[in-house]
Amino acid sequence: MSTASVRLPNWITYGLMPVLNLLVAFLISGLVVWLIGEDPIEALKLLLQGALGSGEGIGFTLFYATSFIFTGLSVAVAIHAGLFNIGSEGQAYFGGLGCALVALSLDRYVPWYVTMPVAVVGAAIFGAAWAFIPAWLQAKRGSHIVITTIMFNYICSALMVYLLAHILIVPGKMAPETRTFLEGGQLPKLGWLIEMFGSTIGAAPFNVSFLIALVMCLLVWLLVWRTKLGYEMRTLGISPSAAIYAGIPYARTVIIAMLISGGLAGMMALNPVMGASARLQVELVGGAGFVGIAVSLMGRNHPVGIILAAILFGILYQGGDALSFDMPNITREMILVIQGLVILFAGALEYMFRPALVRIYQKLVGTGG
Amino acid sequence: MSQAPAIELVGIDKKFGVVHANKNIDLTVAKGSIHGIIGENGAGKSTLMSILYGFYQADGGEIRVDGKPVTIRDSQAAIDVGIGMVHQHFMLVENFTVLENVMLGAEGGALLAKGVAASRTELKRLETDYGLEVDPDALIEELPVGLQQRVEILKAMYRGAEILILDEPTGVLTPAEADHLFRILRVLRDQGKTVILITHKLREIMAITDTVSVMRRGEMVATRKTSETTVEELAELMVGRRVLLRVEKGVATPGEIVLSVRNLTVKDGRGVTMVDNVSFDVRAGEIVGIAGVAGNGQSELLEALAGIRKPTSGEILLHGKTIDKVTPAHLRALGLAHIPEDRHHMGLVLPFEEYQNSILGYHRDPAFSTGPFMNLEAIRKDAALKIEKYDIRPPNPRLRTANFSGGNQQKIVVAREIERDPKMLLIGQPTRGVDIGAIEFIHRRIIEMRDAGKAVLLVSVELDEVRALSDRILVMFAGHVVGEKTADAGEQTLGLMMAGIAA
């Protein structure tokens, strides 16, 4: 019989199922590690230790998680409106330009806390601008948003390399990057937060943009579930025909949702640009846009889920680095395989165990059947 | 009859989670008879037939075919024991010919030529034996609905079905096509086949069946010989109480013209003209019904009037004024409410909680919002009031809309649109898939709207419904309004007009 229509309690859908998926992903990863001749238990220990074993490790983990929260929210907002935004990567990259331009122009005049809000707005505007053309093409011309946003990732990448290598580069230098921001353009680290738990942050670039990410989680929750716009987006996302019936303007809603999505992706740039490297560099996003898709899927497109999933991927990123350092057999590529498995099970195959769970649940709850 | 019954169900039981869809069902269907199964939506008819056809497995009980116990794991197993099914929604490949559709899944080898020849002979035989005439080389998409249904029957017969299950077969047919179908079913019966007819239309049961079984809330409540029962008794058995089969209403007192449609032409997505130069008026205090077989332009007309579909030409006037912006939002603001034909795809967002659907389309109303935010308290209070007034069950505004029954879902839509107190009310298929109790309720509300001086335009493929509610009836055929009749026009007159034969 079909089990798709059976409703499970929330603790199974949002708790047990993701945990099960994660366990299976780790189990298969363990098998892979074992096959190349390493001890899976030891590897897991090293991974967790690297990610969570020290204040510095936690700092790195949360630094990565911050980026993933932004891109995860970006993907989630678009999904609620029925749009699959694959372009968070490019939008975040372009957002970096907006953020850097603000930092470069303000850093010598004002302290960081004045630069920051302006940079947030600048990054959001640039990110949104990069999402606008795909959004417009989808809304007015019906060009599929998945295709256009992917293409815009490449265009952005080429554009940014050109800008950094020819326009923004410091004269006389070889590296394609801007000058280093002064203190007025750098976000302070959150060392005090780590110290509260009796540890030190060390070299980890964990910074104030984490707090901005948490604020955005709250704002996205308000937008999606508490505003009229969010209601219209969800209606459109679930049932386009009902949206037409209800008089919800398709083009306007699509464009606004994509602008918000792009804006959230753009804000991600604050974390690496102003929080870590204090300059604009090529490849600053580093795949966080794509991880955002997995984070959003795994977090069920809900801010709380996104925070949890972002931290998980932060652990995988940071722990993976530590693992490949300690076990040279497990290369950087192996870490990618493990991350891929988590994405596969937690994202793409998220409902794989559902039919079985439904059957077990029905047995246990005792409907007599 | 001394031989073993065609089908015997003993103690069939099925649960879906907490829903007990079939409770210990016993059913005996005699060989060579037409057996009707009747019941409200959600009574468990479809579940029972799905078990018989192998879509679901029963939790308990036994199925016997020709006296022998069988296990039916899937539809192939059902076909193997001689059970064929004609679904409510046809399972045909539109751009294949009749022959190709009949052969599909029974091609008889990797190369087609031999199978084609064999099928052609077999189709010929079925045609002469049972009067199932269809051109084997016609494309499905070019056949009228009645003939498409015949292809479905042919498919079942081709696979050697001795027992034919038909699920709500007349929903899409004109009265004449339905009569033709009944003639075919009688021939099948007289040739020794067994027919099971699932329906919620009492008249059909009386017209065609030999025996009728009534289901209510998952139980088989009664089996009667059709000749020994009455429509009233069956209705009472279905609902569990006495029901009013006729809508009681006074004489209409039409007032000024509210809605005028002038030379309206509407094309569908493929560019086919669905509404062709249609003009009519609807006055305050009257119900104008549009009768027609599904697919003759009523849906497109309704959507155009609601602002959902853009007309290619023509004018729509409200209170004598041309509407400049024919959009759903603008029309709502002008006092036009719309109960759409398809509540699942238009009227409701099924995963939403009930209260969120109770404002769909009116969500920008200042009464339901504070600045950019929704005023959840106001919305839920309003939803609770409507739930009480319309007896929507279960009375829980926080329940997912998908978890309400069809009748209660429809009440959510009806409550939302009627409680806005519109001047003009567009209604499409108000009681499709709705149980008898809710039909009565919804019909009463519609009459109340008329009596309160509102203009009502009703589109329904249920001719009985159009006749019962309307003060004037317009008949649509192939995009044209082919005639206007008063409510007391005979069924046969209207039926002929619906078939495009007379005006």
Image: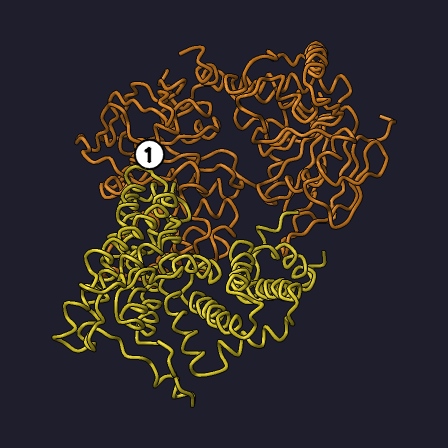
Q: Amino acid at mark 1?
A: Val
Image location of residue A253, percent across then percent down: 29, 48
Chain B tint in image: orange
Chain A tint in image: yellow
Q: Nearer the viewer, residue A304 or B411?
A: A304
Number of numbered markers: 1
Q: Nearer the viewer, residue A368 or A310?
A: A310
Q: Secondary structure at mark 1?
A: strand
Image location of residue B137, percent across then percent down: 58, 12
Q: Residues within 10 Å of mark 1 (few under 14, many from 20)?
A: many
Q: Is residue B418 visible?
A: no
Q: With B344 as the anchor, is B71 left or right in this view?
A: right
Identify the residue at the far left of this view: A109
- Residue at (69, 36) in percent of width and height: B213
Q: Is residue B78 visible?
A: yes
- Asked if residue A99 is positioned above or below residue A81 in the image, the reply reads below
